[in-house]
Amino acid sequence: MDQKLRWGLLGAGHISREFARDLPFARTGELAAIGSRSLAGAERFAAEFPGCRAHGSYATLLADPAIDAVYIGTPHPLHAELTVAAVRAGKHVLCEKPFAMNAAEAEGVFREAERSGCFVMEAFKDRCLPLLDAVIAALPRLGTLGVIETSFGFAVPFDPASRLFAPELGGGAILDVGGYAMEMARRLAGAAAGRTFLEPETLRGVVNRSPVTGTDVTATALLRFPGGVQAILGCSVVTRLANQIRLNGDAGALIWPDPWLRARAGRLEARLVRPDGSAETITAETDRPIFALEADVAGEAIAAGHREADAMSWADTLGNMRALDAWQACDAD
Ligand SMILES: NC(=O)c1ccc[n+]([C@@H]2O[C@H](COP(=O)([O-])OP(=O)(O)OC[C@H]3O[C@@H](n4cnc5c(N)ncnc54)[C@H](OP(=O)(O)O)[C@@H]3O)[C@@H](O)[C@H]2O)c1
């Protein structure tokens, strides 16, 4: 690539900082600017990252001709409208998860993306890890895959004003972390069937809601995929869960601990355990920190003229959003 992709970040919060810290390790892109609701917020952020320009509104960043691609790091309810605004401004988009508040909203965004010609990807960083490829390559050694277990849950003190609980900020465990448990279950059930992903044919769930905010705080789900593979999913913002992926087959089990941790460069490991108790380690080397890998997945696809990334296609995002809609509706009756 002759010139590096010039990234503009929307929202000067926690995850944009993490993305900005990793971006210098990316091969295809560089940090060019931050857009914040306030100029002071943008300037504070820019001061931490040499060469980063400050925009005091999202609109001025989107109008900046020296930006090629935007990373959206705002609370979920802004994801859809900012992605639409970005592609209308001719910017490629890497949007934090969840891509939208629901599948209908996501469909509308992809219609705009289709018209625009821009690249768009939902930022599921775990999809960019080389260890995922190694885990998928090891699947045949588990024999017939029976049950996938995925969970992502942590405990934070209840705060009705925080984005994890406030309905107007998209609060809820399913949208915040249940999406990971779902996208990995779909991805790995798909891989076992020789596909990129599969959609569940059955989904039953249990959802606990905060009596104060009404948002879901802990949720579990049981899925069955075409062909019979089942999945047990958990997510929570008030209880720490196992935070792992476990793939159970008739010839062995594969345990991937902490698949959603903020991976640095280095070796990541999963463990394959056979029924006789013998075990082996599945490893993959990661040469860049996780958000640099993710930025390069987007950067390489954009350089190749693609509109979507193999790591997280539009159909994959839509399927995941539909499954999350179904999970959220489980306590409706
Ligand atoms: N991939 C990951 O590992 C990961 C991890 C954590 C979060 N996330 C995702 O990233 C997104 C942001 O999460 P975060 O933890 O970074 O949140 P955060 O620290 O609260 O930052 C969000 C930023 O969005 C902007 N914003 C715009 N409207 C806002 C509003 N009404 N209230 C609050 N902030 C508003 C603010 O920046 P300005 O004031 O500068 O505009 C704020 O700093 C979420 O969608 C979450 O799912 C992803």
Image (spheres, rainbow, N blue to C red):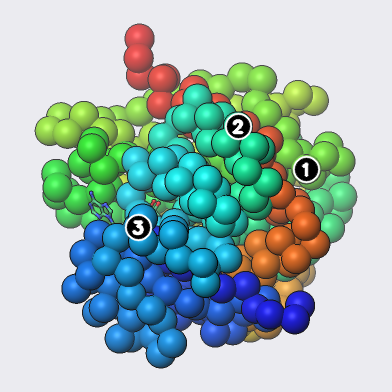
Q: Is residue 292 visible?
A: no
| Labels 2, 1: front one | 2
Three-letter amino acid code at the position of disc 2: Arg
In front of the other: 165 or 108: 108
Quadrant of the rendered image holding ligand 1: bottom left
Of residues 65 and 306, the one drawn nearer to the viewer in this rendering: 65
Whether residue 25 can be seen here: yes
Q: Residue at x 60, y 32 (%)?
A: 111
Give percent across and percent down for residue 37. Answer: 25, 59
Above or below, comparing residue 59 to residue 103 in the picture: below
Instruction: State yes or no: Cβ of the residue under disc 2 lies below 8 Å from any atom of ligand 1.
Output: no
43 w.r.t. 100: above or below: below
Considering depth in this image, is 310 or 254 the residue closer to the camera?
310
Any atom of ligand 1 within 8 Å of the CB at mark 3? yes
User: Answer yes or no: do the residues labelled 3 and 1 have beta carbons within 8 Å?
Assistant: no
Side of 169 relative to 128 (left or right)? left
Q: Residues within 10 Å of mark 2 (few under 14, many from 20)?
A: few
- Quadrant containing the N terminus is bottom right
**What distance separates the C-alpha of mark 3 from that of mark 2?**
22 Å
- Relative to 329, is 152 above or below? below
Residue at which label 2 appears: 111
Q: Secondary structure at mark 2?
A: helix
Query: Would you name the residue on which mark 1 appears?
Result: 196
Which amino acid does the dot numbered 3 rest on? Answer: Tyr
Residue 332 sits in quarter: top left
**Secondary structure of the residue carrying numbered label 1:** loop
Point out the tag, 2 or 1, that comes first from the N-terminus: 2
Quarter of the image for residue 47 reads: bottom left
Residue 297 percent coordinates (x, y): 68, 64
User: Which residue, given by chain and number where applicable, does mark 3 sit on?
Assistant: 58
Residue drawn where x is 61% and y is 19% of the image: 202
